[in-house]
Image: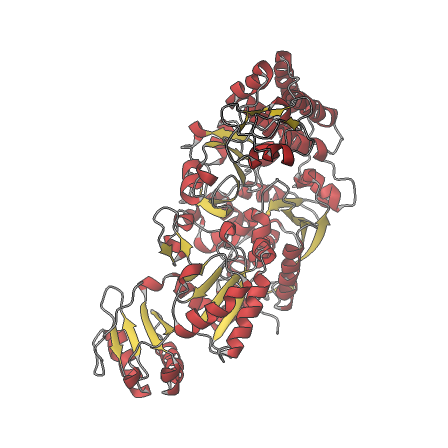
């Protein structure tokens, strides 16, 4: 075996791969061969490091040096300087935005300081395609321990005591769910992993599957033992090709090692897993719709009860858990329920992975203990709002969630606090908005999403979401009336009370929470005919300022509809009736003579 | 790959593959560990620095010393005394040894690394490293 004394870890998440991390690996390997060091330096492709804003990431160990925004052209220099000569390449180190100092150890970066990685424990450390890497990190030991030392009830008791709750959004206690499924006797039971991640901007589950697929395989087998199931199914979006590839490899390797299949580790326990691809319908994240989709039926939810624990896949007892929920399971078994329950807040234990997106400096994937405040997440880890703008709101829980505002910044994040604030945990998407975002438009965006994703089975959701988005459309077009606000509220309540499944019941949340927190913005649209954030085109007017315009004609030349007139060196005027509000004139003007109001 | 037939067998495999990630796990906590830097420029390599480095890695493993990280570095400027190695114990000044042979390396491991006693062969450091 080659004697590797240096490991080069290159991020192989979807984000970094699209920024050519594959080519970086190739170039580093080529250069290593040239330097004659190919057998002392190991180059590995790992899962997501989370710091997607600064990708592609290259980490060199044991020197523990974290390089950011590396390009394929930097590979030669990295090898020649860092690896051959032992000198850090300064220009590729992360620069602290506050102190402007270079930081080479990721532990000293604000982005990582407050994070605690449990579900993401192996992402960015192991090569997801190598089962040996996973085993070396205690992989499959939890399965071994469960199969040789625990009864089903002991295992379920540990899960209950840990306080783990479903990470897909519902927050249902995992141990209880397992107990229900165990309670129903049947000749066949199933374990399903819900990898149908559909919230806009969310990529927690994808990153776990890409960076640490074996943890899901192991956890599903543990779940199978707990409830007495021998077949596991992963329902995964077909739009996640890399996650599918790595998961398939993980399943194949586990089978080859005898960690899946018959008589696992000589204990007589049988368990195997296969994949079903989803077509990306949002509603299929709902467990009954997901099961129907897997059976080849339309992806429509049915009323519960019966819950899947009683009658699920093909009418058999089935336990459905989300990817991130599963990722926590092996650690809980190995480190104990008490350890897990010591992390987090009173009613929400452990950590939560969030996908930070929107107008935030450090877009990426983070994992923090439950009970961390929004302020810590947005300002300390997220590095604050882009371009020094003012924070306005953060949307959590995707299309089912709501918007939190500046007054909620010091709220500790957990399941119950977010619901109390009119939002929800959801699967972990966190979209940050600044002063330039119009909240009515945000609500409209989410309603258009749910309108499109509504399966159409029940009327409140099918028709109701359409009517809601039409009303919002009227308001953003400047045709809103005061009675529309009452209609929005009334309709929202009706949909919440009568829709069949979670999709419909939560669809009005973005409307209600923005109406509550940003009532003045709705009023400005309706009463004053203005959009305070300057987003709604119909309510905007571009105007040339008389005292600033020097008549250079630049705006008139750039206007795509020729609606600006004026002679050279004289004041120019915009014809409001023809203006399409594209803003090209304002961008072009060098004298700040054009304003948007 | 033969199938794993028992939990004990899985544990055995884990022992065998442990080294795959050990270096990465150590690197995460490098500041709490003893660091040995081996000067690995042309002069060092020509004097056998690579062999010394491999020897030390093997020797540390066989002695069961696991609080040490060995990295390579560039020319430290003591070409007259290659191979040279720099030993840094957390919280202490680093020490540079010159003309390191296998016997010397073993002595450094057994005395300096394990017991904290310095041994002969220290050369005066004339450089400082900016972190």
* Residue B95 appears left or right of A584: left
| Residue A566 visible in image | yes
Please state the horizontal and vertical placement of residue A51, each as a whole percent of the image: 49, 51
Outermost residue toward the top in this view: A483
Between A518 and A150, the one lying in front of the other is A518
Q: Quadrant of residue A475?
A: top right
Position of the C terminus of chain A by quadrant? top right
* Residue A132 appears left or right of A60: right
Please state the horizontal and vertical placement of residue A53, each as a whole percent of the image: 51, 49
Please state the horizontal and vertical placement of residue A548, each as a whole percent of the image: 50, 27
Q: Quadrant of residue A412?
A: top left
* Residue A18 appears left or right of A284: left
As displayed, is residue A561 above or below residue A240?
Answer: above
- The count of marks equals 0
Outermost residue toward the right in this view: A297
The type of colouring in the image is secondary structure
Residue under the image location 47 percent in, 68 percent down: A77
| Residue A270 visible in image | no
Please state the horizontal and vertical placement of residue A124, each as a whole percent of the image: 50, 58
As displayed, is residue A574 above or below residue B77?
Answer: above
Residue under the image location 63 percent in, 51 percent down: A228
Between A324 and A43, the one lying in front of the other is A43
As displayed, is residue A40 above or below residue A576?
Answer: below
* Residue B128 appears left or right of A72: left
């Amino acid at each position: 075996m080659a004697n590797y004394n240096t490991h080069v870890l290159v991020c192989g998440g979807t984000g970094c791969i699209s920024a050519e991390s594959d080519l970086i690996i190739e170039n580093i390997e080529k250069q290593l061969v040239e330097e004659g060091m190919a057998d002392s330096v190991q180059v590995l492709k790992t899962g997501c490091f989370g710091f997607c804003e600064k990708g592609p990431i290259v980490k060199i160990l044991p020197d523990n040096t974290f390089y950011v925004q590396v390009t394929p052209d930097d590979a030669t220099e990295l090898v020649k300087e860092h690896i051959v000569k032992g000198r850090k390449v300064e220009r590729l180190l992360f620069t602290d935005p506050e102190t402007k100092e270079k930081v080479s150890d990721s532990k000293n970066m604000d982005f990582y300081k407050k994070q605690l990685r449990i579900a993401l424990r192996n992402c960015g450390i192991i090569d997801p395609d190598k089962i040996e890497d996973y085993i070396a990190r205690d992989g499959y030991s939890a399965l071994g321990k469960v199969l040789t030392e625990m009864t089903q009830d002991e295992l379920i008791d540990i899960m209950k005591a840990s306080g783990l709750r479903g990470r897909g959004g519902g927050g249902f206690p995992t141990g209880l769910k397992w107990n229900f499924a165990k309670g129903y006797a049947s000749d066949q039971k199933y374990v399903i992993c819900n990898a149908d991640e559909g919230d806009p901007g969310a990529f927690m589950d994808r990153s776990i599957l890409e960076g640490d697929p074996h943890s899901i395989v192991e956890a599903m087998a543990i779940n199978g033992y707990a409830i007495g199931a021998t077949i596991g199914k992963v329902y995964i979006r077909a739009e996640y090709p890399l996650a599918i590839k790595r998961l398939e490899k993980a399943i194949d390797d586990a089978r080859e090692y005898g960690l899946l299949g018959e008589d696992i580790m000589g204990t007589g326990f049988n368990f195997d897993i296969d994949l079903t691809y989803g077509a990306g319908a949002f509603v299929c994240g709902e467990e009954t719709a997901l099961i129907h989709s897997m059976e080849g039926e339309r992806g429509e939810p049915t009323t519960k009860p019966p819950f899947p624990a009683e009658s699920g896949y093909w009418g058999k007892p089935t336990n459905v858990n989300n990817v991130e929920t599963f990722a926590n399971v092996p650690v809980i078994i190995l480190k104990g329920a008490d350890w897990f329950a010591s992390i987090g807040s009173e009613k929400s234990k452990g950590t939560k992975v969030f996908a930070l997106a929107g107008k935030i400096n450090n877009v990426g994937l983070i994992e923090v203990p439950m009970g961390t405040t929004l302020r810590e997440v947005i300002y300390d880890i997220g590095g604050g709002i882009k371009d020094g703008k003012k924070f306005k709101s953060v949307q959590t829980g995707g299309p089912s969630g709501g918007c939190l505002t500046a007054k909620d910044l010091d709220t500790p994040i957990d399941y119950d606090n977010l619901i109390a604030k009119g939002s929800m945990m959801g699967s972990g998407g966190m979209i940050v908005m600044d002063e330039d975002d119009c909240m009515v438009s945000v609500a409209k965006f989410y309603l258009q999403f749910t309108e499109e994703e509504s399966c159409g089975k029940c009327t409140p959701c099918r028709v109701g979401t359409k009517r809601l988005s039409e009303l919002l459309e009227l308001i953003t077009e400047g045709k809103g009336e005061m009675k529309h606000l009452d209609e929005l509220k009334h309709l929202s309540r009706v949909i919440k009370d009568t829709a069949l499944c979670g999709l419909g019941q939560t669809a009005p949340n973005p409307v209600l929470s923005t109406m509550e927190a940003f009532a003045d913005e709705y009023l400005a649209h309706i009463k004053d005919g203005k959009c305070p954030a300057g987003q709604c085109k119909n309510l905007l007017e571009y105007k040339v300022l008389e005292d600033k315009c020097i008549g250079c004609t630049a705006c008139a030349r750039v206007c795509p509809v020729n609606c600006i007139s004026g002679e050279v060196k004289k004041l120019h005027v915009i014809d409001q009736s023809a203006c399409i509000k594209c803003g090209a004139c304002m961008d072009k003007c060098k004298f700040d003579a054009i304003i948007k109001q | 790959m033969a199938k794993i037939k028992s939990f004990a067998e899985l544990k055995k495999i884990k022992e065998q593959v442990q080294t795959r990630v050990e270096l990465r796990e150590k690197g995460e906590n490098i500041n709490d560990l003893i660091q040995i830097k081996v000067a690995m420029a042309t002069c060092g390599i020509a004097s056998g620095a690579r062999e010394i480095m491999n020897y030390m890695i093997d020797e540390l493993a066989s002695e069961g010393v696991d609080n040490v990280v060995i990295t390579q570095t560039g020319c430290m400027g003591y070409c007259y005394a290659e191979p040279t190695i720099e030993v840094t114990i957390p919280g202490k000044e680093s020490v540079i040894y010159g003309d390191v042979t296998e016997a010397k390396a073993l002595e450094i491991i057994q005395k300096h690394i394990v017991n904290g006693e310095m041994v002969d062969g220290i050369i005066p450091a004339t450089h400082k490293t900016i972190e």
